[in-house]
Every structure is written in structure tokens, then in C-alpha cells.
């Protein structure tokens, strides 16, 4: 499932966010916003999957968020959105390091 990968990666990136804010200001926080939204969306989908009484969406919609509907070559839309967010953060950091 997606959650294990995201928790590990998100924990690592969060640990570096504070240092990045000290070095480069709060702009990094703005870049992290979309990723935060995706992590929250996945957490909510997991809660609704595990606790049906909390559901506000159809089970199929929840499953599309929780499970990668893509394949070995290409991610599904949710995975692409996460990768796009990560790419924007990486590019921001690369630019800052290049201009150092």
C-alpha cells in the first residue's frame, strides 16, 4: 500500500524542512503545501476505508486513492500528483543549492 512509502519519505522530508526554512525562508513551506494535502487526502481515505462508518465517499473512490491503479511503468493520477509535488520541492532545493 502507498501509506508505508509515504510515511517513510514524509518523515524524512519533514525532518529537513525546519533546516531548509532557516536557510531559505518560508518559501519551502509553500512548496510543501501540495504534498501535505496529498498526505492528508491519503490518510483520510485510509481512515474511511478502515472505518466504514466515517465514509463520505464511495468505496471505489477511496480505493483509487489508497491503491496504486497504475502499473510498473506509470503511476496513476494520484501517484503522478505526489511525484509532481516532490519534483517541485526537489527543483526548489536544487535551485537554492546552485545559487549558493
Image (cartoon, helix red, strand yellow):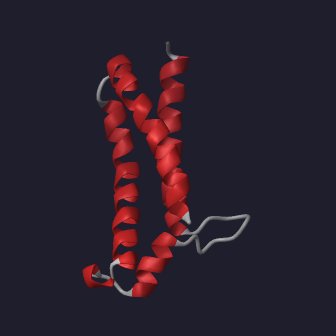
Residue at image point 35% right, 71% down:
47
Question: As rendered, which of 49 and 71 lies closer to the eye?
Answer: 49
Measured along the vertical axis of the image, is residue 83 above or below residue 51? above
Q: Could you say where residue 90 lies in the image, as x and y percent from the top left?
A: 53, 36
Measured along the vertical axis of the image, is residue 12 above or below residue 72? above
- Apparent side of residue 83 relative to residue 35 in the rendered image (left or right): right
Q: Could you say where residue 46 lies in the image, as x and y percent from the top left?
A: 40, 70
Residue at image point 33% right, 46% down:
33
- Apparent side of residue 51 relative to residue 99 in the rendered image (left or right): left
> Could you tell me how many numbered marks the image carries?
0
- Apparent side of residue 30 relative to residue 59 in the rendered image (left or right): left
Res 68 quadrant in image = bottom right
- Apparent side of residue 54 relative to residue 38 in the rendered image (left or right): left
Question: As rendered, which of 73 and 9 lies closer to the eye?
Answer: 9
Measured along the vertical axis of the image, is residue 82 above or below residue 11? below
Question: As rendered, which of 37 and 97 lies closer to the eye?
Answer: 37
Q: Quadrant of the N terminus?
A: bottom right
Q: Could you say where residue 87 lies in the image, as x and y percent from the top left?
A: 53, 44
Q: Could you say where residue 77 lies in the image, as x and y percent from the top left?
A: 52, 68
Q: Residue furthest top?
A: 100
Residue at image point 49% right, 28% down:
93
Res 61 quadrant in image = bottom left
Amino acid at each position: 500500500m502507498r501509506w508505508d512509502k509515504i510515511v517513510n519519505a514524509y518523515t524524512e522530508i519533514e525532518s529537513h524542512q525546519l533546516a531548509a526554512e532557516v536557510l531559505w525562508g518560508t518559501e519551502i513551506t509553500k512548496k510543501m503545501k501540495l504534498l501535505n494535502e496529498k498526505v492528508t487526502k491519503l490518510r483520510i481515505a485510509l481512515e474511511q476505508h478502515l472505518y466504514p462508518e466515517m465514509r463520505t465517499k464511495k468505496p471505489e473512490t477511496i480505493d483509487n486513492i489508497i491503491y496504486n491503479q497504475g502499473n510498473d511503468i506509470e503511476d496513476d493520477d494520484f501517484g503522478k500528483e505526489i511525484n509532481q509535488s516532490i519534483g517541485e520541492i526537489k527543483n526548489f532545493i536544487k535551485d537554492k543549492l546552485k545559487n549558493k
